[in-house]
Amino acid sequence: MSREERRRRSEPMLSLVGLTGFGERYPHELSGGMKQRVSIARGLVQDPPVLLMDEPFAALDEQTRMTMGHELLRIWSTTNKTVVFITHSLTEAVYLADEVYVMSPRPGRMLDHIMIDLPRPRTYEMMATDTFGRLRDRIWQQIRKSH
């Protein structure tokens, strides 16, 4: 693919992830959250039917992690891509997902399949609701039982 074709395809993705004007920056010039946005743009530029995200926010501080989760929901609502999101954060799982699959430790097997019936768009205030707490607790109880 030519340089101009790469640029033509990447510019809309950088805009989508909130990085307009940062296309010429080097990785060491970007914050952790910006690097995660680049990773999302890199995945989306190929226009895959499914976006696989394995612990993408694990190295981020809590505030950046929350912001990136909210940004991921915004990007998802724009692209409508199927996202398979792997996380160890119970709060992140409930906040981002429509469905949560709880897995056991070795050997990995499915312990539970939980439908997340929270309305969209998701808001930070939902995290303080009884429903959110019950969903998070159900995940935790499954994890505790498996250990």
Image (spheres, rainbow, N blue to C red):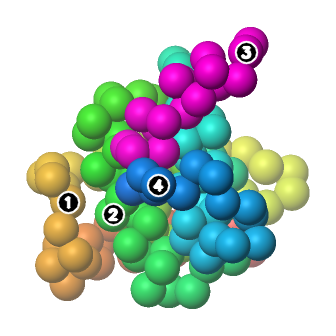
Amino acid carrying label 3: it is Ser
Camera sees residue 56 = no
Residue 10 image offset from top left, x and y in percent: 55, 33
Check the image and report above or below for 116 versus 91: above
The mark nearer the N terminus, 3 or 4, is 3
Q: Is label 2 in contact with label 1 (beta carbons under 8 Å)?
A: yes
Residue with the mark numbered 3: 2
Apparent side of residue 109 relative to residue 97 in the rendered image (left or right): right
Q: Secondary structure at mark 2?
A: helix
Q: Which residue is mark 1?
A: 122
Q: Is residue 125 left or right of residue 19?
A: left
Badge 2 crowding class, 10 Å Cα cut-off, few under 14, some 14 to 19, many 20 or more, is: some
Q: Are marks 3 and 1 in contact (CB under 8 Å)?
A: no
Q: From the image, which quarter does the C terminus lie in? A: bottom right
Question: Which disc number belongs to residue 70?
Answer: 2
Q: Residue at x 25, y 71 (%)?
A: 132
In magenta, the rendered stretch is 1-17
- Percent position (x, y) of residue 139? 48, 66
Residue 96: x and y in percent read: 37, 56
Q: Which residue is mark 4?
A: 21
Q: CA distance from mark 3 to mark 1?
A: 39 Å
Mark 2 → mark 1, Cα distance in angstroms: 8 Å
